[in-house]
Image (tube, rainbow, N blue to C red):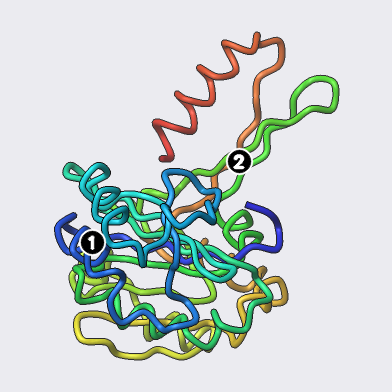
């Protein structure tokens, strides 16, 4: 991912509807967001044998991968990951300046909600990094970076350009959506089984609102609160990895 990327990350209760959606050749996706090729990596393979229109090859890929895979379209890609032991995930990414995402982001939430969507967020990669990224300074001016606070089952990871909370999840986390809108503005809209929240018009508008959004997160119970992190001095590379795993990976997944 680069600083000018866009992502929409959605989580689902069960894997079967997500797998069925892949088998349907991504039914009901808007035409200009529909994938055309499949791959087992994030790099698009423009070959007839990797075309979703190639029924034999695509069916074999689905059989071998169980619906999991990377599905590439015109300047956008989907990472589909069904899980049996934790929520399944669909991630869409593309260009942050692409006008399709502000126009069709809410449509994607409507499309994916019937698959058993629990929680979703969308925004630029920079906004995601501001909410959930960390950077640890190391000797010699080097740094170690990563992400934390992403496990939506433990806490709400943050507030972003576009958000979705199922009724069950909003109740479970005691999310005061009306209070958030009263404080930050934005548009709260009802879907069949939950609520969508669009905080600002364009995904790239986030930086102008970042301080007030972060303040609201800090003052809202149930949301991930970014703790201060400082890497101890004098650690070997192996000890650094162990420290990150214990103090970030396990404490703030």
Question: Which x, y percent locates residue 56?
Answer: 26, 56
Q: Earlier in the sequence, mark 1 or mark 2?
A: 1
Quadrant of the frame with the C terminus: top left
Please report contact status of discs 1 and 2: CB closer than 8 Å, yes or no.
no
Q: Is residue 75 above or below residue 252?
A: below
Question: Which x, y percent locates residue 245?
Answer: 47, 25
Question: Which x, y percent locates residue 143?
Answer: 73, 31
* Of residues 67 and 59, the one drawn nearer to the viewer in this rendering: 59
Tag 2 secondary structure: loop
The residue singled out by tag 1 in the image is 18
Q: Is residue 195 above or below residue 38?
A: below
Question: Which x, y percent locates residue 182?
Answer: 47, 88
Residue lying farthest to the right in this orientation = 140
Dot 1: within a 10 Å radius of its alpha carbon, few (fewer than 14), some, or many (20 or more) residues? many
Q: Which mark is residue 228?
A: 2
Residue 183 lies left or right of residue 250; in this view the side is right
Dot 2: within a 10 Å radius of its alpha carbon, few (fewer than 14), some, or many (20 or more) residues? few
Query: In the rendered image, which quarter is residue 142 located in?
Result: top right
* Of residues 101 and 35, the one drawn nearer to the viewer in this rendering: 35
Residue 127 lies left or right of residue 152; in this view the side is right
Residue under the point 61% across and 54% down? 129
* Of residues 217 and 167, the one drawn nearer to the viewer in this rendering: 167
Instruction: Give the label, 1 or 2, closer to the camera.
Output: 1
Residue under the point 50% across and 54% down? 47
Residue under the point 50% across and 17% down? 242
Q: Which mark is residue 222?
A: none
Residue 83 lies left or right of residue 142; in this view the side is left
Numbered marks: total: 2
Q: CA distance from mark 1 to mark 2?
A: 37 Å
Q: Is residue 210 above or below residue 155?
A: below
Tag 1 secondary structure: helix
């Amino acid at each position: 991912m680069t600083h000018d990327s866009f992502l929409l990350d959605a989580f689902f209760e069960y894997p079967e509807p997500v797998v069925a959606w892949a088998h349907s050749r991504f039914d009901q996706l808007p035409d200009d967001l529909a994938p055309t090729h499949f791959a087992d990596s994030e790099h698009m393979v423009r070959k007839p044998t990797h075309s979703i229109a190639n029924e034999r090859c695509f069916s074999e890929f689905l059989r071998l991968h169980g619906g999991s895979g990377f599905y590439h379209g015109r300047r956008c890609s989907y990472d589909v990951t069904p899980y049996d032991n934790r929520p399944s995930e669909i991630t869409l990414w593309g260009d942050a300046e692409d006008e399709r995402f502000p126009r069709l982001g809410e449509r994607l939430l409507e499309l994916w909600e019937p698959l058993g969507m629990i929680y979703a967020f969308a925004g630029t990669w920079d906004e995601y990094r501001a909410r959930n990224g960390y950077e640890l300074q190391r000797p010699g001016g080097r740094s170690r970076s990563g992400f934390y606070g992403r496990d939506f089952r433990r806490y709400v990871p943050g507030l972003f350009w576009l958000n979705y909370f199922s009724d069950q999840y909003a109740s479970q986390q005691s999310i005061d959506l009306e209070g958030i809108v009263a404080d930050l503005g934005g548009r709260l809209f009802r879907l069949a089984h939950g609520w969508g929240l669009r905080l600002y018009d364009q995904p790239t508008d986030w930086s102008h609102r970042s301080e007030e959004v972060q303040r609201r997160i800090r003052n809202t119970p149930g949301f991930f609160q970014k703790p201060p992190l400082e890497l101890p001095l004098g650690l070997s590379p192996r000890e650094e990895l162990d420290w990150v795993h214990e103090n970030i990976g396990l404490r703030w997944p």
